[in-house]
Image (spheres, rainbow, N blue to C red):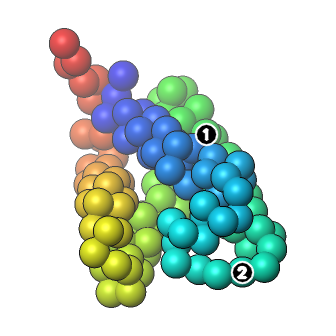
Amino acid sequence: MSAISLILTVKMVVTVVFVAGPFLLLPRSRLAAMTAVTTTSATLFRLYGMAATALLVGYGFGLWQSSNGVFPWGSVLMGIVSNIGATGILAFNGTASSRAYCAVFGTIGLLLIWAALRPTGAFQPLLLW
């Protein structure tokens, strides 16, 4: 597996487990407690979950491209904007509990920047034990 394929795979798993899945499936009361956002309807949360699902489609096409030897520029640039943007918003507007999310999204964003700056290196196979 190449570095870019691993980055995209990890990003997709993180998005399903921590963003799309919870925002589409958890009850409104639980999401309100997690986010400190109060609302009378779960619609706002569900819309965010659907937006995250749309990002998964973009990452999925990027994974398919990278598996076929094509550098996934669209997915990489989308991921940079999404992850670095989320990191900035959480860093400046988030709570102390959002630091872990900053670390995860920031790391993924930095890895995608690295891949964009070194697309040939991003295709190197990884040696996993």
Callout in the foreground (1, 2): 2
Q: Nearer the viewer, residue 36 or 74?
A: 36
Q: Is residue 55 among what the camera can see?
A: no
Q: Tell me where residue 126 sits by quadrant.
A: top left
Residue depicted at 72% across the width and 80% down the height: 39
The amino acid beneath tag 2 is: Thr
Instruction: Give the residue pinned by disc 1.
Output: 60
Other residues around mark 1 within 10 Å, as few (<14) / some (14–19) / many (≥20): some
Quadrant containing the C terminus in the rendered view: top left
Q: Tell me where residue 52 sits by quadrant.
A: bottom right
Q: Nearer the viewer, residue 94 or 78?
A: 94
Give the secondary structure at mark 1: helix
Residue depicted at 36% across the width and 22% down the height: 1
Q: Label 1 vs label 2: CA separation?
A: 32 Å
The image position of residue 110, as x and y in percent, is: 27, 60
The image position of residue 125, as x and y in percent, is: 28, 23
Instruction: Give the residue pinned by disc 2.
Output: 39
90 vs 34, left or right, is left
> Mark 1 or mark 2: which comes first in sequence?
2
Give the secondary structure at mark 2: loop
The image position of residue 21, as x and y in percent, is: 63, 47
